[in-house]
Amino acid sequence: MSTAPVPRALIVLLAMACFVVVVAGLRVAGQIILPTMVALFLSLLSLPPMRRLERLGVPSGLAIAIVVIAASTMVFLVSAVFGRSITQFQSQIPFYQERLDLLVGSAVGWLAAKGIELDPDKLVGSIDGSAILRLVSNTASGLVAALSNLFLVILTMVFMLLEANSLAAKLRTAMGDPNADLSQFTRAAKRVNKYLAIKTWVSLATGVLVGLLCMVVGVNFPLLWALIAFLFNFVPNIGSIIAAVPAILLTLVQYGVGRAAIVGAGYLIINVLIGNAVEPRLMGRRLGLSTLVVFLSMLFWGWVWGPVGMLLSVPLTVIIKILFEYTDDLRWLAILLGPGDSASWADSDSDSGSIGG
């Protein structure tokens, strides 16, 4: 007895319904998933040094202990040092808003003297600089809050690293072939590790340079602006702009237009040097994303998980894109997610292939 084919429209509706259910679950379970995602990224960053220690003859358990202790120390320092700076900064936001309102009022008076009439009440009411400061502050504090659950993050990380040693055997068992070729999966995993490692080091360099810039100019909370620059450097194209605006606003409030221009020029030089010279040379064009995809990804994950989701959006999307590249049926999606010249390298890519294919 033959069965009637399922209408394609019904399949699409079912897929959309499943997508909505999954997204709703991700949003509700954010308090559990976010520390897990932090643990996942720490595990991916810790895996190469753990493998290196094992190759040097260090027992697997000791290698895991070394990288976990190093990661725990880093998480603790970030939570302690930057958490304090964020708290102090948040308490000063109302004062900075008052100062910004006074500066806007002075600018309106200067324009009026030049014959340009503006309504000061409407202009001051429309410029809410504290909203920008609060957005950046809440983003940083959200990440610190995710890191503050240190026990859950580190425990999850330990289990992930322990599972890494048996992952290949599990995949072969799941595929029903003890001699299955996992080279495509291995290449995809190496590219994910490469992306995260390079992006982390480049972002760290950006944060250090921004921190030094703010210290030299005398901007309050230089450690906070270094953290913000580090975090938002994971968001290409628009992340550097988001990170620069609050620091420039604060410099404007503290010292006026002159030093604010210096800070703005410093941010521009740092991001042009890192973003246009260093990072593309290390990363390669293939790990890039379309600017539209970056923006939409930030909106989506920001809606699902708040400000921290915005920071995680691009690394998550890049990982998904890499996995798509190594799957024949989904490689076209990787091309759509990539930059404008993605098709050129997709046609000439000799490494691509389906996972396990």
Image (cartoon, helix red, strand yellow):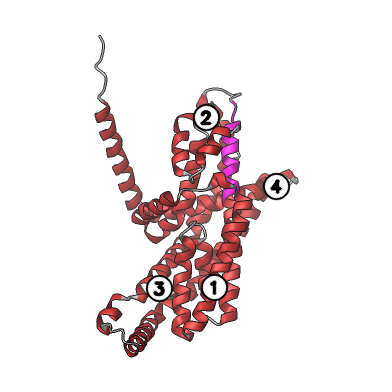
* Quadrant of the snapshot with the N terminus: top left
Residue 160, percent from left and from top: 54, 46
User: Which numbered disc covers residue 350?
Assistant: none
Marks 1 and 3, how far apart at CA: 20 Å
Left or right placement of residue 277 versus residue 56 in this view? left
Asked if residue 121 is positioned above or below residue 26 in the image, the reply reads below
Q: Is 276 part of what is drawn in magenta?
A: no
Asked if residue 186 is positioned above or below residue 242 in the image, the reply reads above
Which residue is identified by label 1?
265
Asked if residue 245 is positioned above or below residue 169 in the image, the reply reads below
SS of the residue under disc 1: helix
Marks 4 and 3, how far apart at CA: 42 Å
Residue 85, percent from left and from top: 49, 75
Question: Residue 33 or 289: which is nearer the viewer?
Answer: 289
Query: Which callout, 4 or 2, points to the residue nearer the camera?
Result: 2
Query: Which callout, 1 or 2, points to the residue nearer the camera?
Result: 1
- The residue lying furthest to the right in this view is 56
In primary-sequence order, the first of circles 4 and 2 is: 4
Which residues fall within the magenta stretch?
A: 181-195
Neighbour tally class for label 3: few under 14, some 14-19, many 20 plus, Cα within 10 Å: many
Determine contact: label 1, label 3, CB under 8 Å.
Answer: no
User: What residue is rendered at 58% in x and 34% in y?
Assistant: 349
The quadrant where residue 54 appears: top right
